[in-house]
Amino acid sequence: LQNDKCRYMLADEVGLGKTIEACSVLKVFLSNKAEKRVLITVPRALVAQWRTELLFKFGIMEGENPNGHFLMLRAVEDLDKSAYNCRWDFVIVDEVHKYLFSQSEYEKLHKISRLAKNILLLSATPVQQKKEEYLDLLRLLLPQKYNSFSVEKFGKLIAKQSKIIQKTALILDDLGDFEEEINNLAESGENAHDSEECEELFEEMHEDLEEICDELDDDKLNELLQQIKYENDDLGVYEIKVIISYICSNYQIESNIIRNRRKILEPTDDEDVQLMASRDLVELIYLTDNEVNPYEQLSYNGFANWIIK
């Protein structure tokens, strides 16, 4: 929500609350905006569930909403040209992995994604080894970026990814030490350009970046590398941050995929485990008020009489 565009895939394990997560993001998105058009498209069997979740837990209705918002909730199978040929401000697609094997449904979702500014895809956890399926999911998430990828090119990117991420993480650690040393020298009135330690750190980072550039063979990346100069006022810190940002945004495949696993979320403390596993029923006393809400009282009386009979 802090980004200019919210385009993410929620790929948590089953049962960890992707629906609630998506509804929460949508609620915040709508809270400080006006006249936004929202499409939520789900398998036909889940339409009623989504309608209930939206209304009773988040106060979001189909059709017109406060602040001039409009929401359409429709099964993927029932989408027509009026739904997939227009620009939506926010789109949620549930169980998106189920439509990878239906060309007609997939093309509908692809058109919607290309025209939408913000999109949340809810999916089972994608598997990198299934390259074609994984690439098809990413084309729905970021079509401008992945439409041009062949399966072969995508496979090569996956193979390079882990090595690139490891190398980039090491550079980030060195960059932290580099900036700290520059600041310490500045506080003591010394010139960081004359520091042997700073020069060694810079050379290490530059060599690591050269290895990444050689691995990726990206003209833009090579151009950014040429701009990193130790002679710059900040010893090249800004340019190093720019090139790292470029690498992360263009070569970190899962930067737009959010996944939580049950194992990671499990508490480690025995007492916490016991509390987590325990589900006790608690009786709450609730009094109806005939003056404030007579329909509630009438409904209660009706149910009570039916039970007694």
Image (cartoon, rainbow, N blue to C red):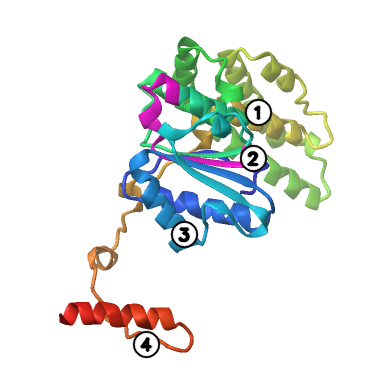
Start and end of the magenta stretch? 88-105
Label located before the other in sequence (1 or 4): 1
Please give the residue where the numbered disc 1 appears in the rendered image.
246
Residue sitting nearer the eye, 58 or 259: 58
Please give the residue where the numbered disc 4 appears in the rendered image.
287
Q: Which mark is residue 5?
A: 2
On screen, residue 114 above or below 179: above
Label located before the other in sequence (1 or 2): 2
Does the image show residue 142? no
Please give the residue where the numbered disc 3 appears in the rendered image.
55
User: Please, what secondary structure does the residue beneath circle 3 have?
Assistant: helix
User: Please, what secondary structure does the residue beneath circle 2 have?
Assistant: loop
Task: For marks 1 and 2, give the CA distance.
Answer: 17 Å
Q: Of circles 1 and 2, which is in front?
A: 2
Residue at position x 23%, y 73% from top? 280
Label located before the other in sequence (3 or 2): 2
Identify which amino acid the numbered label 2 is placed on: Lys
Contact between marks 3 and 2 (CB within 8 A): the answer is no
Q: Which mark is residue 13?
A: none
Query: Residue 286's spot in the image, x, y percent?
Result: 35, 84
